Image (tube, rainbow, N blue to C red):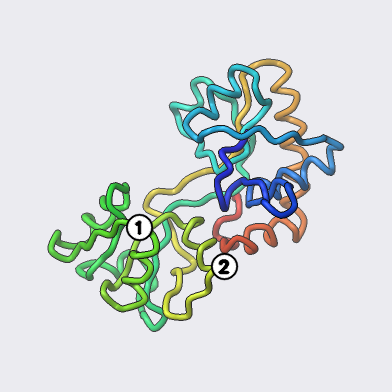
Amino acid sequence: MTSNDAPFSFVDEKTGELTGIDGEMLNAMAEELDWNIEVVVTDFATMPQSVLSKKADLIADGLYVTEDRQKTLSFSDTWYTQGEGMLVPANSTLTSRDDAKGKSIGVMTGTTHLEIAQSLTDEKNIKMYDSQANLLQAVANGQVDAAFTDQAVVAWSLVQNPNDKVKLVSPYEPYFPGTIAAAFRQDSDSDELREALNGALADLKATPKYLEILQKYGLGSDNAAK
């Protein structure tokens, strides 16, 4: 089950193959397990219910492990971690969230990243933007000293459209860390699938391919599962 959500898990329009961070990891594990993967696409919000109603066996699509979701779903071991990213001008000397205290900060309207900005600076220094593109441009133009946005999304954006005027701070410890894993139903058949997948996941993490997948989509060793 996927919501066709880049860069996490989506169907490549050219090849028709499942790709993305979760998609490529799942393909690698499925190859070891000799599984045939059939992709089922639905809206992100309906993925849990679709698995619970047996329209698919598992979710692999950047799904955070939360206490609320654990009430109805069973999660695999951690695939990787990701939260917000800190975006700064290319010539910036800021190397951590603490360095942004008192600085001008940009965030997208309606996101939880506003909370981060409010913890670091006065309201007068916070600038709101209505799109990721406008936020990135504000950083590139030096209109803000730093910006906070979804790490994986902006990293993938910079892979697709390199911009030498901005950079993601790395390594970076997120304010809102997220643990990503596959989700299953809570039943004996799903338990068997989950344990098989966990074994293949452990094998994948022991190979260079694991980090290569993360790096392909703009993430890195600080996103690797501990």
| Image height of 134 relative to 65, above or below | below
Q: What amino acid is at disc 1?
A: Ser
User: Looking at the image, which residue is at 63% across and 26% down?
Assistant: 184
Report which quarter residue 199 is drawn in: top right
Query: Residue 166: where, in percent of width, then height?
Result: 42, 75
Residue tagged 1: 131
| Image height of 52 relative to 144, above or below | above
Q: What amino acid is at disc 2?
A: Val
Between 63 and 40, the one nearer to me in the picture: 40
State left or right for residue 219 relative to residue 54.
left
Query: Residue 78: where, in percent of width, then height?
Result: 60, 42
Mark closer to the chain start, 2 or 1: 1
Report which quarter residue 86 is drawn in: bottom left
Query: Residue 208: where, in percent of width, then height?
Result: 75, 61
Name the mark on residue 159. Answer: 2
Q: Of circles 2 and 1, which is in front?
A: 1
User: Looking at the image, which residue is at 57% across and 63% down?
Assistant: 218
How busy is the neighbourhood of tag 1: few (under 14 within 10 Å), some, or many (20 plus)? Answer: few
Number of residue marks? 2
Distance Cα–Cα, label 2 vs label 1: 18 Å
User: Looking at the image, which residue is at 73% across and 18% down?
Assistant: 189
Q: Secondary structure at mark 1?
A: loop
The outermost residue toward the bottom is 91
Q: Secondary structure at mark 2?
A: helix
Name the mark on residue 76. Answer: none
| Image height of 101 relative to 183, above or below | below
How busy is the neighbourhood of tag 2: few (under 14 within 10 Å), some, or many (20 plus)? Answer: some
